[in-house]
Image (spheres, rainbow, N blue to C red):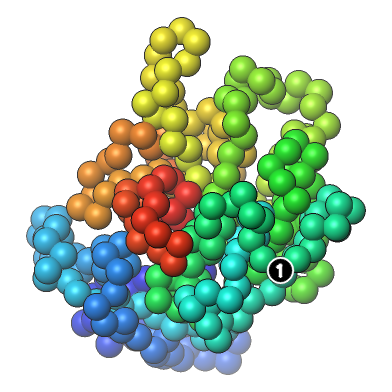
Amino acid sequence: VEDIHTNEIVAERFAVTQDSAANRVEALPPVETQHAAPLELRVLSWPLPPRGPPKRDLRFYPNYVYFQHRHPAYIYHVETGINPNHLDFHRRQIEWLFTPRAMYQGVVTRTETPDGGGHGTCTASKAAGRIFGASKSATLVVVKMADLTEASVAGVLGTVNDDIISKGRQGRSVVTISWGSTAPVAEAWPYPAGKPWLRLLLEGLDRIDQHSFLFAAAGNAGQTLDPSGKKRHIIDTAPAVYVSNGGLLRSVTVGMCDITGNLVPDSQESVGHDNDHLYAPGDAIVCPTGIHSGTSFGK
């Protein structure tokens, strides 16, 4: 959604674009700076030196530097709710979208579910919070699910896709998913294997991939053992496993590293699809609800 600027010098350059009349020179969007920013945002602004990797000492990079949007942009945050009254969402643009199951069950309060533990609020703040968020101007669309049961998961991406299409937001939207199935898909739901809820999930995933970007948490079971005694270091839960192995164009899984760029062992990885997988700081991340760790918080 937001182009993260890596060097203030580059911001002074111009992008050459074509239109139907003639060539024209268009200035890049305005550059904004958040001073004394959270550590993980400062990582996103590491400038690239002429040679070699960037310095990993964050004392050299106290700020977060980023482009502001020229046009409206939207972050569809699929969760069981957030606390919109938190300071980090003060004066932020927030919309709510409820899944059919949530409406059927009457789960339509604009807040986070009591058993959420602040997970939804934290992940939303990392995406679009005033202080902790990567995007300072995108509209946050909270897609509220009733729960994380199969019935809830089934239609959630179809709901998101329909909203994007009906409002003409194709090409200006990002979808974030910070959860995964409790059991490995290979053990519980072989693909495509006749599970109606899973077919609906995959159909929604495919539709969204046609016009918008989707980021799914890779999973935190990298040090957990499977029944054969092997570590589950490869992504194996839904929907991330289908993002990782589905050959999609605009959907990626997000693993976890620390603020120095070192991989965290708990993070699960993609295999054979490096272009569909990236890493972001997710270890001991500070957000409005406390300190959290996991691939959910890297998105």
201 lies left or right of 46: right
Question: Which image quarter: residue 143?
Answer: bottom right
Vertical relation: 246 (above or below) 26: above
Question: Which image quarter: residue 192?
Answer: top right
Q: Residue furthest top?
A: 228
Residue 166 or 98: which is nearer the viewer?
Answer: 98
251 lies left or right of 107: left
What is the secondary structure assignment of the residue under circle 1?
loop
Vertical relation: 268 (above or below) 105: above
Place of residue 115 in the rendered image (x, y in percent of width and height, measured from the top left): 62, 49
Residue lying at 42% horizontally and 86% vertically, measured from the top left: 29
Place of residue 195 in the rendered image (x, y in percent of width and height, measured from the top left): 79, 27
Residue lying at 21% horizontally and 82% vertically, measured from the top left: 9
Residue 263 seen by the camera? yes
Q: Residue furthest front?
A: 114
Residue 203 seen by the camera? no
The amino acid type found where label 1 is placed reads Arg
Place of residue 56 in the rendered image (x, y in percent of width and height, measured from the top left): 14, 58
Place of residue 91 in the rendered image (x, y in percent of width and height, measured from the top left): 55, 86
Residue 131 or 274: which is nearer the viewer?
Answer: 131
Vertical relation: 195 (above or below) 54: above
Q: Residue furthest right?
A: 104
Quickly name the residue at label 1.
110
